[in-house]
Amino acid sequence: MIPLVAAAHGSRDPRAAATVHELLTVVRSRAACRGFGGLDVRAAFLEHCAPSLPQVLSAVGCPCAIVPLLLTAAYHSKTDIPAQLASARAAEVSLAGTLGPDRLLLTALERRLAEAGAGLDDASRARTSVVLAAAGSADPSANATIARLAAAWQRDGRWRAVVPGYAAAGGPSPAEAVAGLRGPVVVATYLLAPGYFADKIRTSALAAGADVVSGVLGAAPEVADVVLTRYEGSLGLGFAPSRAERFVAGAQLYRTDRGDRLVNNALHPGKSTGTDGFGGMCISGQGPRTPSGRHGTDGAPTSRCSRRSPRRSSCACSTTRARRRVRRESR
């Protein structure tokens, strides 16, 4: 069975690595329920702590599937991970998209709010405002994704208001967002693991008057399910909300469901690798999702293979071959 390598950001705070390992314990447990009993799941860290991604790739060998434990598509998913793959000169690996945005992550946020004491009944939602507190990014598209996620949660969650707050880059900060709202205000911490930013969000939001600040997403079962969905999607075993692409380091050759093609950038900057995760509402800004699961800027269905040539049959069969290989190895 193809190993799953979970690539986390990494932190100097030991609580962060402990939380990642706790999450992966849940991933292993839930993998068995999805037909992946005995799945080899390993953690790698992009910075600050070991083991690094190249170290884990060297240990597990290839092929393997890399799932970034990142909530938005920004520098680490667009540039850092592809660069580390290239420097490691790994053999063929499957690289999934980021975990977020995804509807299951909103369910996990509500789980954490309830654990912190926030009321989730209809009457409480109608009078309560939520600050969706993320780390923030120097990449404007990542912050815009958080803003669209907040708008979708307000609409679907029936909260009085949901506004974004950014702890590191962009504005408003979580404290500023709390101060700008009236009535009960709760803060949903949209971070995967505890550390500097989680502590900063909690301290500043409570000082600004927040009634409740939730804990990080951590090892919530919904997060584990998103990790497994990304893993399955990267291998072509199911619908992949964040379309995965196979990466061969060095040559930077991506094998996709549209055939093999060379690219000279890192995960196609300017093209989001995120997903809407909202049943057709495109949070990623790529355009509406078509019935086939692909995006078109005008909402029109896009072809499965961009080339009408004899190679089309090999493109169309790549998913079937991946399915058969994993099923054979799991026996």
Image (tube, grey):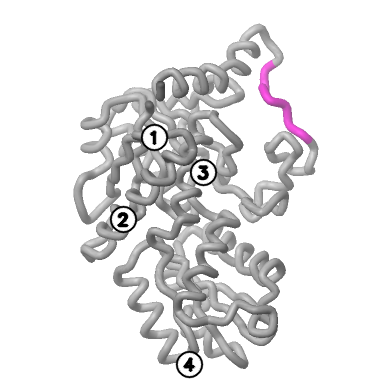
Q: Which residue is drawn at 23% across and 44% down?
A: 52
- Percent of width and height locating residue 106: 56, 63
Q: Residues within 10 Å of mark 1 (few under 14, many from 20)?
A: some
Q: Nearest the camera: 22 or 167?
A: 22
Instruction: Give the residue at mark 4.
Output: 209
Residue marked by disc 1:
37
Q: SS of the residue at dot 3?
A: loop
Dot 1: element: loop
Between discs 1 and 3, the one toward the N terminus: 1
First along the sequence among labels 4 and 2: 2
Q: At numbered mark 4, what does the secondary structure look like: helix, strand or loop?
A: loop
Q: What stretch is highlighted in magenta?
A: 301-307
Image: 73 above or below 130 = above
Callout 2 amino acid:
Glu
Closer to the camera: disc 1 or disc 3?
1
Label 1 to label 2: alpha-carbon separation: 18 Å
Q: Looking at the picture, does residue 146 appear above or below residue 281?
A: below
Q: Is residue 60 left or right of residue 240?
A: left
Query: Residue at 68% of width from left, 38% of height from top?
Result: 293
User: How far is disc 1 from disc 4 in space, using C-alphas?
Assistant: 46 Å
Q: Marks 3 and 4: in contact by CB < 8 Å?
A: no
Amino acid found under the numbered disc labelled 1: Gly
Query: Which tag, 1 or 2, sits closer to the chain's start?
Result: 2
**Mark 3 = which residue?**
269
Cα–Cα span, label 4 and label 2: 32 Å
Tag 2 residue: 22
